[in-house]
Image (cartoon, helix red, strand yellow):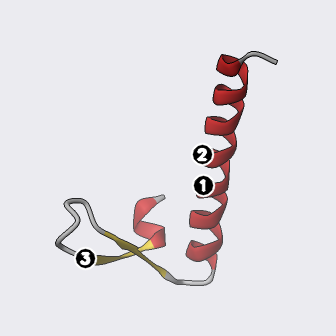
Amino acid sequence: MSNKEFSDKLKAGIELAGKRMLEEKAVRGEDLIVSSDGKTIERIPARQLL
């Protein structure tokens, strides 16, 4: 397996894990804590992000 193939598979796996986490949080009615600039912290309902 080349480095490019490994990198592509790793990226796809991370994206899939993030999507599953977001879906599970939405089912449980939980929020996601995000910071876009490293200074401001926001709580966003997971359902809103789907």
> Which residue carries the number 3 mark?
41
Q: Residue at x 64, y 28 (%)?
A: 7
Q: Secondary structure at mark 2?
A: helix
Q: Secondary structure at mark 3?
A: loop
Rendered image quadrant of residue 6: top right
Rendered image quadrant of residue 23: bottom right
At label 2, which amino acid type do we have? Glu
Q: Which is more foreground, mark 1 or mark 3?
A: 3
Q: CA distance from mark 1 to mark 3?
A: 21 Å
Which residue reaches farthest front? Answer: 3
> Which residue carries the number 1 mark?
19
Whichever of labels 1 and 3 marks the residue nearer the N terminus, that label is: 1
Left or right of 35 in this view: 11: right
Q: Are marks 1 and 3 in contact (CB under 8 Å)?
A: no
Residue 22 rendering spot, x and y as whole percentages: 56, 65
User: Which one is nearer the viewer's eye here, 26 or 20?
Assistant: 20
How packed mark 2 is, by other alpha carbons closer than 10 Å (few <14, some 14-19, many 20 or more), is: few
Residue 15, label in figure: 2
Whichever of labels 3 and 2 marks the residue nearer the N terminus, that label is: 2
Q: Are marks 2 and 1 in contact (CB under 8 Å)?
A: yes
Q: Are marks 3 and 2 in contact (CB under 8 Å)?
A: no
Q: CA distance from mark 2 to mark 1?
A: 6 Å
User: Which one is nearer the viewer's eye here, 31 or 13?
Assistant: 13
Q: Residue at x 54, y 84 (%)?
A: 29
Left or right of 27 in this view: 31: left
Residue 21 rendering spot, x and y as whole percentages: 62, 65
At label 1, which amino acid type do we have? Lys
Q: Vertical placement of 50 versus 13: above or below?
A: below
Q: Which is more foreground, mark 2 or mark 1?
A: 2
